[in-house]
Image (cartoon, rainbow, N blue to C red):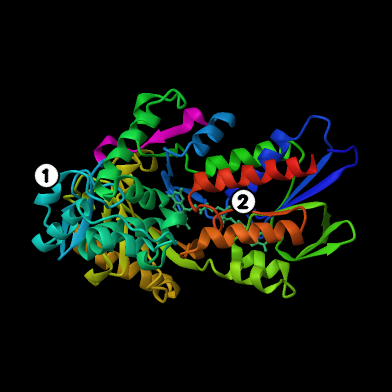
Amino acid sequence: MDETKRSIVIIGGGITGLCAAYELIKSSPPNSKLDITLLESSSQLGGAIQTLRRDGFVIEKGPDSFLFRKPAVVQLCKELGLEKDLVAMSPDSTKSFIYMNKQLHPMPEGLSLGIPTRIGPFIKTDLLTLKGKVRAAMDFIIPRRTATDDESLGSLIKRRLGTEVADHLVSPVLAGIYAGDLNKLSTAATFPQMAYMEQKHRSLILGMLANRRTVQDANSSEKHRLPEHLKKSMFLSLREGLMMLVERLNDVLRSSGVQIITKCEVRRVVGVTEGYQISTTGKSYTADRIIFAVPAEQTREILGERLPGPLVEALTSVPGVSVVNLAMAFNESDIPVLFKGAGFVIPRDQGMRITACTLTSQKWPHTTSPGKVLLRAYIGHSDDQKHVDEDDATLIDVAYRELSSILSIQRKPLFCEISRHYGSMPQYLPGHLDRITKLEEQVGTMYPGIIMAGKSFRGVGIPDCIRQGRDAAKKLIGAAG
Ligand SMILES: Cc1cc2nc3c(=O)[nH]c(=O)nc-3n(C[C@H](O)[C@H](O)[C@H](O)COP(=O)(O)OP(=O)(O)OC[C@H]3O[C@@H](n4cnc5c(N)ncnc54)[C@H](O)[C@@H]3O)c2cc1C
């Protein structure tokens, strides 16, 4: 990088934007003159990640954990000195349930992403009819697909394992991640390993078995020097909530001279002779380079109506689904027979409005004081967007009624915290990765020095967003090099 001072603006203070800023200060050479500003529209940082600490409860209003297998979060926690704050899922919460035909059924053991990998529990489960089980077993003999286009997840699962497995096992499990319709989600952009497994092993069941062994080996490898109890947990979280990550990043960035400006919504970015002019609800900024760490829809709005057609098309092809979650606190005595487990999911055809419920206090003991119970119910799916807009009282009433019918709850909650996330779950439609690759190429040519990163593009999970934010910064520094 040359001797003149360079200004870099990051738009969006979610985990992607924060990690982009962090990587900029970490990777830029000591003598580089970088002027880094992060602009965030809301009053607080973190985007989807928001933790509320209330009455002894740690309540996650957005994500509650992250996948251990993807190393980006653990790596970042180590760098930020948060390794000692990592917490594992309770060993009591290894079981999950599916609510069907007015009963909770344990998920068959060995289910991986909803795909059966153990014959015994699969044969015994009453979640599928005999016909459904026989159809699933055909996975062992059906030839592999020869077409190479990006198939929808629904089509792939139904083709190999049948409709019952797709609707009753895979769909409710994956709905928790995308709140979406399997038939509309891209396999290549969401679970590319499934298409790969079919090509390599022909059978998804055999592929999943082989994959589980590899994952176990990776988790036990030396690259994660963590205590055993953490390594055994598929998901991890942080003792005082995931917001710890945001708070620590905020401290590190501010003390390194990054200007962080909240309540500052970016309205427009236009190219000027040297760099870009950024108009906001506050003052205007100029920047040599910009990292867009906002969802695709906001990126399109900011770049304005003069955006060429193919870019508009790519940026509007990642619709966001809205979801609500309701954290409900109870006294233990109000739920006399709470089963041991992480929670349950509800297939869409069961006539319930809630799509799932996490038994948060059992799954994550750090969230709750002894004698209390914390539940988190979810409403909102790509095929149910109307209920997200209902008023708080109606949502609480519906969630309470449905939960008490399933869990025999005796009393109304001590309190309920509602978190609405509008358009927050990006839907990667078939062809997503090709569209994003083209988008990146076109942006690189038409808007030099602008990079887009975050949940709309190359992965929605926290580890993917951290990776994207950091990669965007490295790319920007490299390009400025
Ligand atoms: C309810 C829910 C539960 C989830 N659970 C999990 C989980 O358990 N584990 C997991 O790994 N992932 C989970 N995810 C996904 C993950 O949390 C998100 O995908 C990730 O945090 C997104 O980060 P981001 O920075 O890309 O986007 P965001 O978090 O959306 O951040 C974007 C930021 O940009 C700001 N912004 C928008 N427009 C402008 C503008 N014009 N000017 C300035 N700022 C702007 C927004 O205010 C926001 O702060 C969950 C997501 C949701 C919504």
Residue at image coords 41%, 70%: 382
Residue 414 seen: no
Q: Look at the numbered disc 2 and give the secondary structure of its residue.
A: loop
Q: Quadrant of ligand 1?
A: bottom right
Q: Find out if the beta carbon at label 1 lies less than 8 Å from the nearest ligand 1 atom.
A: no
Pointer 2: residues within 10 angstroms few (<14), some, or many (20+)? many
Lateral position of residue 407 relative to residue 76, left or right: left
Lateral position of residue 296 relative to residue 8, left or right: left
Residue 74 on image: x %, y %: 49, 34
- Which residue in the protein does label 2 denote? 45
Query: 396 and 468: which one is in front?
Result: 468
Asked whether 380 falls inside the magenta stretch, the response is: no
- What type is the residue that disc 1 sits on? Gly
Residue 183 on image: x %, y %: 36, 67
The answer to whether 275 is drawn above or below residue 301 in the figure is above
Q: Find out if the beta carbon at label 2 lies less than 8 Å from the nearest ligand 1 atom.
A: yes
Q: Look at the numbered disc 1 and give the secondary structure of its residue.
A: helix
- Magenta segment, which residues? 82-92
The answer to whether 28 is drawn above or below residue 316 in the figure is above
Residue 12 on image: x %, y %: 65, 55
Q: Earlier in the sequence, mark 1 or mark 2?
A: 2
Asked whether 86 falls inside the magenta stretch, the response is: yes
Lateral position of residue 304 relative to residue 337, left or right: right
Q: Which mark is residue 120?
A: 1
Real-space Cα separation, disc 1 to disc 2, in angstroms: 47 Å
The quarter of the image holding the C terminus is top right
